[in-house]
Image (spheres, rainbow, N blue to C red):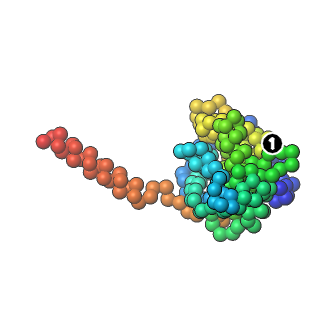
Amino acid sequence: MRKVITKFIETLPRALIAGAVLACGSAAQVWAMPITKQLVVNVVTVCNDAGLNCASQGPAGNTFYEAETDKIWAQAGIDISFVNAGTLNSSAFLTGASSVTDFTGPLGGTGTTMYLTSDLLCSACTLYGEAYLNAGGLVINMGAVNAFNAGVGRLDTIAHELGHNLGIGHPADAQYLMAAGSLRNIPSNLGEICPDPDAASCFDWLPADQIAIALASDLLVDFSPVPEPMGLALVAVALFGLGLARRRRA
Ligand SMILES: [Zn+2]
């Protein structure tokens, strides 16, 4: 992460850096936060000039690593909603960009915009993604993210970069979601992501002070977790069950 993030590191409060060792299921941690907020992520997929060879959107059946991203941000009571927002047809940007600043300036308003590319240039390094701090706008190197860990994928990169948009910098604890990529423990499956009561330890943890920062973000909108169609579906199931019961009695 570049300029903006570096600036934030210098102002990190000491208490945040001295992170405690974390074990899942510890009594101090409240795992089940009710979902009260939503972050809408508009996804722009970069393709070549002809609109072909578009960047990957992630694993089949789990586009944008949504399962991992949602589990991670549920710790803060935040639902992440990905919305396809079309393509950007540019061969240069597909494999030749090096920063989120190539794609967009920092975005205001609610929600954020995520650009998916096939590669990001980085001198003697791998740049998995980059995001604005406390503003919308991020880019993800889906080629590198998908290839990580022998193709398992770097499961928490999208969740991490979204955390920067929500205002969190780089704490110095490897088990925190927001730890820098060079330090962070990367989960290799959903079960290694906090919270998981069965795990001896878990990764991608969001402690209370970082949750508070995220929940104060202007990018979020209020969210009601039970949409009306689901309520109607449940009513239909209940009526169907009632019908069965009546038939059995007859
Ligand atoms: Zn970062």
Q: Residue sitting at 74 percent across and 63 percent down? A: 103
Residue extending farthest to the front is: 50
- Above or below, 204 relative to 44: above
- The quadrant of the rendering that contains the C terminus is top left
- Above or below, 27 relative to 102: above
User: Residue 195: which quarter of the image?
Assistant: top right
Residue 141: x, y in percent?
Answer: 72, 50
| Residue 161 appears anywhere in the view | no
Q: State the count of labels.
A: 1
Q: Secondary structure at mark 1?
A: loop
The reply, left or right, for residue 231 in relation to residue 144 is: left
Camera-side residue of 126 and 3: 126
The reply, left or right, for residue 179 in relation to residue 75 is: right
Residue 213: x, y in percent?
Answer: 70, 57
User: Residue 89: which quarter of the image?
Assistant: bottom right
The residue that mark 1 highlights is 182
